[in-house]
Image: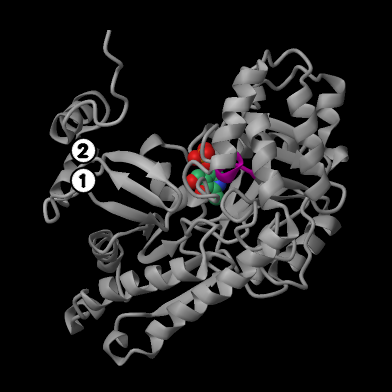
C-alpha cells in the first residue's frame, strides 16, 4: 500500500471546497474573496509555507510568521528540540495518561512553573486551552471569596468557553445572548472607573496584562499596582491573563511582573498561561495560584476534571520548552530584539510619506501594534503584509490596529527583513481621504 500523503494530499481548490462544505463556507469564501489560498503547507522556523499561492502570486508562497497565533509559536514552528521532545516522550512510553492517577510529568512541570511564578504562586491545575484555564481561575476566585462579581475590560478577550466568554467584550458573545449578571466591564487603563466599580461584592478582577484583541493597550505605570492595592484592601482575587503576554513575550516569564515596567513587580493571585504553553505542538494551558485559593481542592481534589488537559506527553514537551524560554540569556535576548524591533517601527514614523497613515506605534518586548486612522486599514494592511510575505493581522476588538508578535527566536537579520517587508506594505497603502476621517 502506498504511503498516505500528509501535506498536499489534494489540490488547494478541492480542500477549500471541502473546508467550506464540512467546516465553514463563509470562512472559506472570505479567504477566497481576498485572493488568498490560506491552506497551510509545511512549516519550519519563522516561516509558514502555503500549500499553493495566492491569486496574485501563483507560485507557493512563504510567509514570515509575525502573528504566531498570539504566542503559540514563540519558538517558531517545529523547533527541533520540541520535535525531539515529542518523539522522545512517545519512545519513552508516554501518552495522555489517566487524569485520575498521579502523574510524574504533571508533578515535574508544576514544580518548574512554581519556580518561575512570582510571590507565593505555587499550585497549578492543567487544562487543554486558555478559555478552560480562565474558567477555572474565575471559579477558584468565586469559591475562595464566596462572592460572585467579576470585573474585566470592555474590549478584553479571554476565550470562548462559558465563564471566560462572559468576561470578554461584546463581539464574541452577543450572538449567544451571553450577557449575564455579575460581570462588570470597565475601560481598560481607567483607574478612576475601576475604583468606582470594585467593591466588597467583587470576587475577582481579570485583565490581560496587555489586551491583545483590544489593540495592544499599554496601561500607565502604576495601574496594576493600584489594582493590586485595592484587591488587597477589599479581599478581591487578582487574576492575570498572561495567555499572550507570558512565557517571555515581554522579556519576563510573567509579563505583569516586570515585563510591562521593569520596576513594577506586580504579584497577582492567579496567573493563566496557554498558547505558548503548547510549545506549538501539544495543546496545554495552566492556571497557577497561591495556596490559599485552592481550599476547594483541599476539600475535594476530584471536584474539577480535565480529561486531556495536562496530557503527560504534552507536559514533557512543555518542560523542554520552558527549559529554553526561561534561560536568562533567552529572556535578555527578547528585550534586546524587542528594542531593535521598536527602533525599526519608529523609523516609519519619521517617514513623511507615512505621515497621515500611522496614528500610533506601541508595545513591549516583542509585542507591538501599529494603529491606523480607521478600521479599513486593519484588513487593508493585513492583505498588504501577506502580499509582501508577512503574516500578521488586525486586532479583533480594535480593527484599526495591527498586531505584530514575531517568534521570540528572531535575530537582528530577521528584523531587518521584517522591517523591509512592512515598509513596502505600508507604502502600498492608500492615504486616508478627508471623507474617511470624518
Ligand atoms: C488573552 C487571551 N486569553 C485567553 C484566550 C483563550 O485561549 P484559547 O483560545 O486557548 O481558549 C485567548 C485566545 O486568543 C487570549 O488571547
**The quadrant where residue 423 appears:** bottom left
Residue at horizontal 67 percent and vertical 39 percent from the top: 320
* Residue 373 vertical placement versus 298 (above, below): below
Q: Residues within 10 Å of mark 2 (few under 14, many from 20)?
A: many
Which quarter of the image is occupied by the N terminus? top left
Please, what secondary structure does the residue beneath circle 2 have?
A: helix
Looking at mark 2, is its residue's CB closer than 8 Å to ligand 1? no
Q: Which mark is residue 276?
A: none
Q: Determine the image quadrant of residue 138.
A: top right
Location of residue 7 in the rendering, given as x and y in whole percent from the top left corner: 30, 30
Local crowd size for mark 1, using a 10 Å CA cut-off: few (<14), some (14–19), many (≥20): some
In this figure, which residue is indicated by the disc labeled 2? 28
- The answer to whether residue 322 is left or right of residue 359 is right
Residue at mark 1 = 31
Inspect this view and state whether residue 104 appears.
Answer: yes
- Judge by depth and name the residue closer to the eye, 148 or 243: 243
Q: Residue at x 79, y 57 (%)?
A: 267
User: Which residues are drawn in magenta?
Assistant: 273-277
Residue 224 in picture, x, y percent from top left: 71, 65
Is 107 inside the magenta-drawn segment? no
Question: Where does the C terminus fall, quadrant-wise?
Answer: bottom left
> Which secondary structure is most common in the magenta stretch?
helix
Amino acid at each position: 500500500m502506498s504511503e498516505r500523503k500528509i501535506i498536499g494530499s489534494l489540490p488547494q481548490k478541492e480542500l477549500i471546497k471541502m473546508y467550506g462544505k464540512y467546516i465553514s463556507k463563509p470562512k472559506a469564501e472570505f479567504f477566497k474573496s481576498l485572493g488568498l489560498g490560506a491552506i497551510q503547507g509545511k512549516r519550519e522556523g519563522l516561516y509558514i509555507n502555503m500549500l499553493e499561492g495566492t491569486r496574485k502570486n501563483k507560485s507557493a508562497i512563504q510567509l514570515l510568521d509575525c502573528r504566531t497565533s498570539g504566542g503559540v509559536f514563540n519558538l517558531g514552528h517545529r523547533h527541533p528540540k520540541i520535535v525531539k521532545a515529542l518523539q522522545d516522550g512517545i519512545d519513552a512510553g508516554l501518552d495522555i495518561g489517566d487524569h485520575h492517577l498521579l502523574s510524574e510529568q504533571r508533578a515535574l512541570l508544576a514544580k518548574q512553573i512554581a519556580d518561575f511564578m512570582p510571590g507565593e504562586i505555587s499550585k497549578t491545575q492543567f487544562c487543554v486551552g486558555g478559555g478552560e484555564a480562565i474558567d477555572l481561575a474565575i471559579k477558584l476566585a468565586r469559591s475562595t471569596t464566596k462572592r460572585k462579581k467579576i470585573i474585566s475590560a470592555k474590549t478584553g478577550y479571554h476565550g470562548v468557553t462559558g465563564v471566560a466568554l462572559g468576561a470578554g467584550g461584546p463581539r464574541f458573545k452577543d450572538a449567544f445572548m451571553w450577557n449575564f449578571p455579575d460581570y462588570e466591564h470597565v475601560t481598560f487603563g481607567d483607574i478612576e472607573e475601576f475604583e468606582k466599580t470594585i467593591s466588597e461584592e467583587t470576587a475577582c478582577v481579570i485583565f490581560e496584562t496587555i489586551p491583545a484583541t483590544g489593540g495592544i493597550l499599554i496601561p500607565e505605570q502604576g495601574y496594576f499596582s493600584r489594582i493590586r492595592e485595592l484587591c488587597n484592601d477589599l479581599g478581591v482575587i487578582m487574576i492575570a491573563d498572561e495567555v499572550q503576554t507570558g512565557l517571555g513575550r515581554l522579556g519576563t516569564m510573567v509579563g505583569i511582573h516586570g515585563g510591562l515596567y521593569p520596576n513594577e513587580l506586580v504579584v497577582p493571585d492567579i496567573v493563566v498561561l496557554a498558547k505558548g504553553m503548547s510549545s506549538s505542538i501539544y495543546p496545554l494551558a495552566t492556571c497557577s495560584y497561591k495556596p490559599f485559593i485552592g481550599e476547594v481542592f483541599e476539600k475535594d481534589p476530584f471536584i474539577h476534571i480535565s480529561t486531556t488537559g495536562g496530557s503527560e506527553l504534552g507536559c514533557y514537551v512543555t518542560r523542554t520548552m520552558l527549559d529554553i524560554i526561561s534561560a536568562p540569556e533567552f529572556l535578555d535576548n527578547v528585550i534586546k530584539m524587542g528594542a531593535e524591533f521598536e527602533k525599526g517601527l519608529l523609523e516609519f514614523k519619521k517617514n513623511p510619506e507615512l505621515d497621515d497613515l500611522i496614528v500610533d506605534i506601541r508595545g513591549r518586548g516583542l509585542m507591538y501594534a501599529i494603529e491606523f486612522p480607521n478600521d479599513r486599514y486593519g484588513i487593508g494592511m493585513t492583505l498588504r503584509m501577506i502580499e509582501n510575505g508577512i503574516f500578521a493581522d488586525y486586532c479583533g476588538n480594535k480593527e484599526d490596529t495591527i498586531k505584530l508578535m514575531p517568534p521570540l527566536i528572531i535575530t537582528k537579520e530577521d528584523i531587518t527583513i521584517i522591517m523591509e517587508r512592512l515598509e513596502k506594505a505600508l507604502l502600498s497603502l492608500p492615504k486616508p481621504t478627508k471623507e474617511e476621517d470624518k
